[in-house]
Amino acid sequence: MPVVNVKVIEGVFSDAQKAEMVQKLTDAMVEIEGENMRSLTMVIVEEVKSGDWGIGGKPMSTEDVKAAAAGM
């Protein structure tokens, strides 16, 4: 049974966006493994506390990610 684990910083994605991640990642896995595996494919979206995620030695906050997404 495949498990896809997605980690995101809390407060960046809406519930609708997280649901879309689950749907699209499931679809992507089913393309590889076959339709019979859809009901066995698990996608877990796990939120990490703002500031508990670091890139390049620097903690990233929810605000940092939103600014990066906005091209700032």
Image (tube, rainbow, N blue to C red):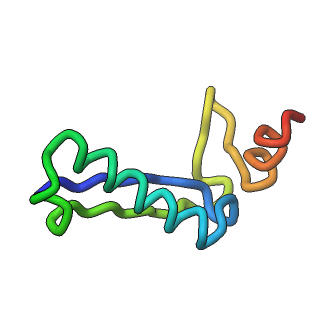
Residue 31 pos. (x, y %): 24, 43
Q: Residue at x 16, y 55 (%)?
A: 35
Where's the N terminus, which quadrant? bottom left
Image height check: is 29 above or below 68?
below
Viewer-proximal residue, 32 or 63?
A: 32
- Residue 39 point in image, percent of width and height: 17, 68
- Residue 5 position, x and y percent, is 34, 54
Residue at image position (23%, 50%) is 30
Q: Residue at x 26, y 47 (%)?
A: 29
Most extreme residue toward the right is 72
The C terminus sits in image quarter: top right
Q: Is 6 displayed left or right of 15 in the figure?
A: left
Is residue 32 toward the left or the right of residue 63 in the image?
A: left
Residue farthest bottom in this picture: 15
Q: Is residue 42 above or below residue 6?
A: below
Q: Position of residue 48 (x, y in %)?
A: 54, 60
Going 10% across and 59% down the picture, which residue do you hit? 36
